[in-house]
């Protein structure tokens, strides 16, 4: 069992957990992920390594409650154990030589972008961060974003906090000011990453996105996480999850991401029903 040593609620849907996993902490690098299974009846789900403490032997995960497994995970408390916690998996982000970067997080994607911004900041790069949320209740990691960047901009779609509007508007404004970035890193909903890539494409600015397709084994065997990049088939678990945003077939990725929606909804309803949250087992 992998013991949960810290649990924090970041907003009503998002939690942070530090988990005792010394072997993973020893090798983890920004951009990588773990696959966990909450209990022996559970599914395996991938979560990004949001942080690690090699001395304490802990790995931090930040997750949004979206379905059955993330709900079951959110019901665990400090001191409880997670059955499987495998990693680090995936290719670490290539951050060497970057002197100036704009790191963009969309919603929960902010938690996945934050370790990359932090690593860049720690290596002396100038980091601008733009993080967008639907409204102020969903804002996470505000202090951490500021600490990891030389310039931090928070946007909300409804203007309830920070600047009103989308992250792409702020990226355009930063570029119009004359900022020259070695790289733009965008992590969030597929549609956001697609539009960020369209802003940077005509300017020839290298753009890295992080793809989160459904993963099963995480070892390149099952083909579940197949994506098309530069016209070639890639597996996000072993070739990514970071890819060149200008080469990704986002439309195909969006079609594939909704393939299992009905089955996932049914599975969550059943779990909610079993734990007394009022789900409909016949849904
Ligand atoms: C490399 C990678 C890193 C990720 N990092 C994070 C993270 O740091 N924090 C976070 O909250 N989420 C992250 N995710 C998404 C997370 O894995 C899903 O939210 C989780 O699997 C949902 O499971 P569920 O049973 O709660 O929900 P379900 O109801 O089963 O699914 C809800 C949605 O989650 C996605 N999903 C479901 N099963 C999987 C799966 N096996 N693999 C990938 N996606 C799935 C699908 O888009 C689905 O529509 C990451 C995904 C990938 C591939
Ligand atoms: S998760 Fe099976 S090939 Fe990537």
Image: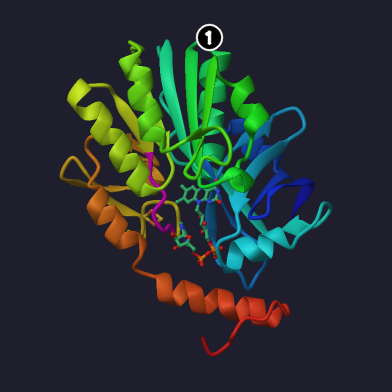
Q: Residues within 10 Å of mark 1 (few under 14, many from 20)?
A: few
Give x and y (percent) for residue 142. Answer: 63, 32
Please provide percent x and percent y for residue 103.
Answer: 45, 27
Residue 214 on the magenta segment: yes
Tell me if residue 203 comes above or below residue 219 in the rendering.
above
Residue extent of the magenta highlight: 210-215
Q: Residue 221, position in %: x, y?
A: 36, 57
Front-most of residues 203 and 212: 203
Indicate left or right for 12 with 81 as reference. Answer: left
Residue that protrudes farthest toward the bottom in the picture: 282
The secondary element bearing badge 1 is classed as loop
Disc 1 marks which residue? 124
- Most extreme residue toward the left, as rendered? 231
Above or below 176: residue 130: below
Residue 174 figure quarter:
top left
- Magenta segment, principal secondary structure? loop
Q: Residue at x 68, y 54 (%)?
A: 12
| 25 or 111: nearer the viewer | 111
Cβ of mark 1 under 8 Å from ligand 1: the answer is no
Residue that appears at 44% across and 43% down: 188
- Across and down, in percent, residue 198 comes to 24, 35
Instruction: Classify residue 182 as left or right of residue 40.
Output: left
Q: What residue do we see at 65% from left, 70% from top?
A: 40
How did the renderer colour the structure?
rainbow
The N terminus lies in quadrant? bottom right
Q: Nearer the viewer, residue 128 or 214?
A: 128
Magenta-drawn stretch contains 234: no
46 versus 113 height, above or below: below
């Amino acid at each position: 069992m992998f013991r949960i040593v810290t649990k924090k609620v970041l907003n009503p849907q998002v939690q942070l957990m530090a988990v005792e996993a010394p072997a993973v902490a020893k090798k983890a690098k920004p951009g990588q992920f773990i696959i966990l299974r909450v209990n022996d009846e559970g599914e395996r789900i991938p979560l990004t390594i949001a942080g690690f403490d090699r001395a304490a032997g802990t790995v931090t995960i930040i997750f949004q409650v979206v379905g059955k497994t993330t709900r079951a995970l959110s019901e665990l408390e400090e001191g409880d154990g997670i059955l499987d916690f495998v990693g680090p998996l995936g290719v670490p982000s290539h951050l060497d030589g970057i002197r100036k970067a704009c790191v963009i997080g969309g919603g929960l994607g902010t938690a996945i972008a934050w370790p990359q911004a932090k690593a860049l900041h720690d290596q002396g790069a100038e980091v601008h961060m733009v993080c967008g949320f639907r409204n102020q209740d969903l804002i996470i990691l505000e202090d951490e974003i500021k600490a990891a960047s030389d310039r931090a901009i928070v946007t909300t779609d409804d203007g309830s906090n920070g600047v009103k509007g989308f992250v792409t508007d702020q990226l355009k404004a930063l570029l119009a000011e004359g900022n020259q970035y070695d790289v733009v890193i965008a992590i969030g909903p597929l549609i956001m990453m697609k539009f960020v890539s369209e802003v940077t494409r005509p300017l020839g600015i290298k753009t890295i996105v992080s793809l989160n397709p459904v993963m099963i084994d995480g070892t390149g065997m099952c083909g579940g996480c197949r994506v098309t990049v530069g016209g070639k088939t890639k597996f996000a678990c072993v070739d990514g999850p970071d890819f060149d945003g200008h080469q990704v077939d986002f439309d195909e990725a969006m079609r594939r991401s909704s393939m299992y929606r009905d089955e996932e909804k049914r599975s969550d309803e059943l779990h909610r029903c079993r734990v007394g949250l009022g789900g409909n087992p016949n849904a």
